[in-house]
Image (cartoon, coloured by chain):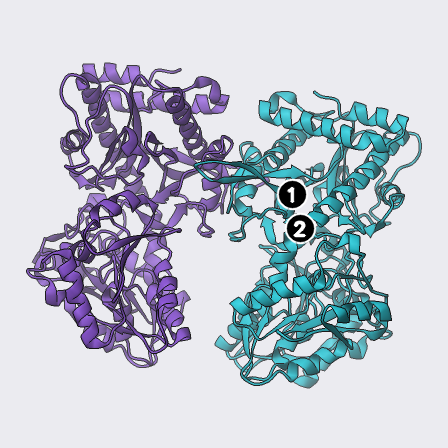
Chain colours: A cyan, B purple
Amino acid sequence: MTYPEKLSEIRRQMSADGVSAYIIPSADPHISEYLPDHYKCIPFVSGFTGSAGTLVITHDFAGLWSDFRYFEQATEQLENSGFELVKQKIQHAPEHITWLISQLNKGDTVASDEKLVSVLLGDLLTQQFSLKGINLVSKDYLSPIWENRPALPSEEAYLIADEHIGESVSSKLASVRAAMETKAADYHLVSSLDDMAWLFNIRGKDVSYNPVVLSFALINQDHAKLFIAPDKLTEADKESLLKSGVEVYPYEEVENALAQIPAGKRILIDPKRNCFAYAKLLPVSVMIIKDTNPSTQLKSIKNNVELANTRTAMRKDGVAITKFLKWLANNIGKIQITELSAAAALSGFRAEQEGFVGDSFNTISAYRAHGALPHYGASEESNAEVKAESLFLVDSGGQYLYGTTDITRTIPMGNNTEEECTDYTLVLKGMIDGCKARFPKGTCGYQIDAITRKPLWDYAINYGHGTGHGVGYFLNVHEGPQTFNPTATPVAIELGMITSVEPGVYRPGKHGIRIENLVNTITDVSNEFNEFYAFEALTIAPISTKIVKKELLEAAQLKWLNDYNASVYEQLSPFLNEDEAAFLKEETKAI
Amino acid sequence: MTYPEKLSEIRRQMSADGVSAYIIPSADPHISEYLPDHYKCIPFVSGFTGSAGTLVITHDFAGLWSDFRYFEQATEQLENSGFELVKQKIQHAPEHITWLISQLNKGDTVASDEKLVSVLLGDLLTQQFSLKGINLVSKDYLSPIWENRPALPSEEAYLIADEHIGESVSSKLASVRAAMETKAADYHLVSSLDDMAWLFNIRGKDVSYNPVVLSFALINQDHAKLFIAPDKLTEADKESLLKSGVEVYPYEEVENALAQIPAGKRILIDPKRNCFAYAKLLPVSVMIIKDTNPSTQLKSIKNNVELANTRTAMRKDGVAITKFLKWLANNIGKIQITELSAAAALSGFRAEQEGFVGDSFNTISAYRAHGALPHYGASEESNAEVKAESLFLVDSGGQYLYGTTDITRTIPMGNNTEEECTDYTLVLKGMIDGCKARFPKGTCGYQIDAITRKPLWDYAINYGHGTGHGVGYFLNVHEGPQTFNPTATPVAIELGMITSVEPGVYRPGKHGIRIENLVNTITDVSNEFNEFYAFEALTIAPISTKIVKKELLEAAQLKWLNDYNASVYEQLSPFLNEDEAAFLKEETKAI
């Protein structure tokens, strides 16, 4: 079936039901960022494969709402699909709702599959639509027209090894239950897969890049029920869970369990990380307490075992990056290197490392002008040859059994323009100011964001993405609650949180530059004014100084750069052969 | 009646009514910061005269909840009053509610005069208390025991002169009504006195420092009713208002007007700037839309007439400051100068300026260790002699018919210690970074706050107050919605907003340093990355360079300092006599 045929099939069903508009979000019942094939609805309907977007279909319009990161990709992929790109002004803002309200009339009905709608979005839709007398119903118009729709993943799941844990399931459940008590919650539904993975020390292979497994949990003070496809866990793992007080039930059973919660009870549900359909399954007399999952905060603060293991992961990742940089330097101009072949080579170097599980996201291997697309993913069609000139931006990461990495280096390939050198130096200034920030306890991400952007703002430059995101421990490369971005998100940066620092400059048609390290929050000075925190650089990989305009760096920035590179050599060289160590010595020499 | 006698009289009334706790906030029915004498309840009951605090009285405890700014003052003033100081952790946080909940039992009753309780606080009290089964009632226990309670002020009010306005009342009403329409509000109640003053181009003398007049307004699409004591306005002013579509009614009539709003109507009320008692007067069928007053945002964006006039006010204020600095320099060590006599001298120099109305707040004239109390107010008892050594912090401002000023200078008096010189330079670095910030359109105050604090954080120093506040136009020296502070307040800094930049360092027992300018937001570069904004320095007064450690300043900071001082000389010298100009030349010479 072609995309236009699918569109008319959907409209046929809408007409039959008297539905005026159909909304297709990018989500699954766990409100995941990365989706199992079964839930890749937007690619199925429109051909668009970006990770953020919403389709809205009316009888005379079909559009994809997506943000600037995907404007180019969407324009290309939506050609002849019947869908038009609607450019969002603000990332993730529900701008399609405002549009729908302007198009619809009192008494109209809007449909969506409410298993793919977060409670937050569902509440917003209900509220906005009810003001205008528009009805909202749940419909799945895709299954009837989706021949051979992929089944739910049947990959195995497993409990993470003891030496990689740092905290038992019982202890984690106790913390969650304590948090439930402070909110007077009798029950707590967990749907988000990274929270599930952390809480039950469980990992799986159900989606790309994130080592998670489709599952739900329903917790009260006496029971912790884990809902998961029965053949995903070994009997030994099930027994181990039972010893921690976790009862295993079939995946679909969660629906009954929700419907059977006794009248008058209170249930804690994270509106951003649970689906609207399941919230609606609850008996009306059950009171919903809408708040962030307690595990989100607990998970973000890494324990000492997790931090020690992460440092190992970072060292191994740094060795792989060094080997990759050397391979690139040795082979450029000699063999044909493309964005895809370079990304494959890098994956190969990571795969040589013990405990490597897979990439932590789709490598952004972006040469020259492709670097100006912050979320570029090279395809067979776009695949550019990497040459001995301009800049090559590589943003990549690995999942190891003992940690998750995420690193961006922008590699000067030779013959760089003045503008490339200046932009590179300014990004580096921002990245260094973020990494060497000292800040009082209680400081939030938006403050670190401002400090990182200032050196770029001084030169009238800005970047359209956040400065940094939380990173999981052998888990999702994006996790909350902390974030370094300009929005007013009042989440304090706590000791043990792992966050990225990754400012950039993007000049469409020319080049893109981003330099990224992961940092851990550590204690610094305590004095009469405050308890101050600082960042430990977790990422261990050389930062090229080849095109740095030294005169633009402040003394403290230059010192940080030279100290960092010296420390990279010191930490990685014992794990390199002589040639590699010599290469790294040169890459990390002080300027 | 002594304070303990008043306390027992209040408790007697509480007992008679079966009330377990009585709350006395610092407010009036307009939820003002500065109060008419009639509403100075906390000083009457406890003797504490600070501008922020809450009294809570139970049968076995009486406490003043206040923040670090007032710890010293409160400790002194509460001695033998029967009240204890309870130190708030967070400024303005309702920490007394948590304490009350921990003390009271189901079925207990808490009373307060709900005319002095904001809608926001009232909602919070209701919600928190209802969870524990505690009742909330409105009682005024002060009037019965307050002999000769001061009457409401009967000062005259007046319409501001045409050349000082920039926008007519009709035009302002039209903007407010447009904002009401977007919120589908049929009515809008305005209680806050600075909003009233702006909206009706009216000024008065009802409270200290703020040129406002006690009044309310009730607005719908057809009527704008102004409630004000009838003899405050001349017939001419009333006629002028009527021509702008404003009907004048007696002050107390607002209560009836609220009670008579037709069933089913929607009224817009700012929960922070209206009293709980009046919200309760509304018929139950009237729906309250709780949102910020539209005039708050409109008022914060100064029009061109207001900006031009403010620049004149700043020039006159700078002349007064220069004369004051010269007087201080010439007389120190020759005549006895105290904190109070210096403040009086400064007021005198301001009073020489045409159009001066009065101080815009109680001058903080704080010598040496007194400077370490950020909101110190010199009294006859505390009044220190200013000597030719250490630092003298003077934070002051004037109300002119054409603008409001607010400026802090910390004056090196001689023989300064290394620590004083370093601290002074670091505060200056922060102040300069804030003032010379370039930032993309959409930037919020917390981002400017972080940029201003960074130079201090780098040296492990912080300050406990915000970096800056909005400033009115011949109106309150503190106004919203914008604020430069670390909290997540998502208010963008718009063109034409006037805000202060005033970082500080406070070393208890030693010294305090704060340097403050007011800035206007102006356009800067626009390019492929964004539209950038910057700040215009509005304050025109020399910044002493005597104890600046030049080696701690970055080149760009030094340039800003020298350029600023040069511009101060250029702008002020035409209005100074020869001696004064020579003094200013020396004070502003480049370093």
Which residue type does callout 1 highlight? Asn
Marks 2/1: CA–CA distance: 9 Å
Q: Quick check: can you spot residue A99?
A: no
Mark 2 vs 1: CB contact within 8 A? yes
Q: Residue A372 at x, y = what percent?
A: 70, 41
Q: Which residue is mark 1?
A: A520
Q: Please give left or right for residue A98 compared with residue A295 in the image.
A: left
For the C terminus of chain A, the image quarter is: top right
Pointer 1 indicates a residue of which chain?
A
Can you say which quadrant of the picture contains the N terminus of chain A?
A: bottom right
Residue B338 located left or right of residue A524? left
Residue at the spot of label 2: A302
Is residue B471 placed above or below A329 in the rendered structure? below
Chain under callout 2: A
Single out the residue that lies furthest toward the right.
A335
Q: Amino acid at mark 2?
A: Lys
Mark 1: few, some, or many residues within 10 Å (few <14, many ≥20)?
A: many
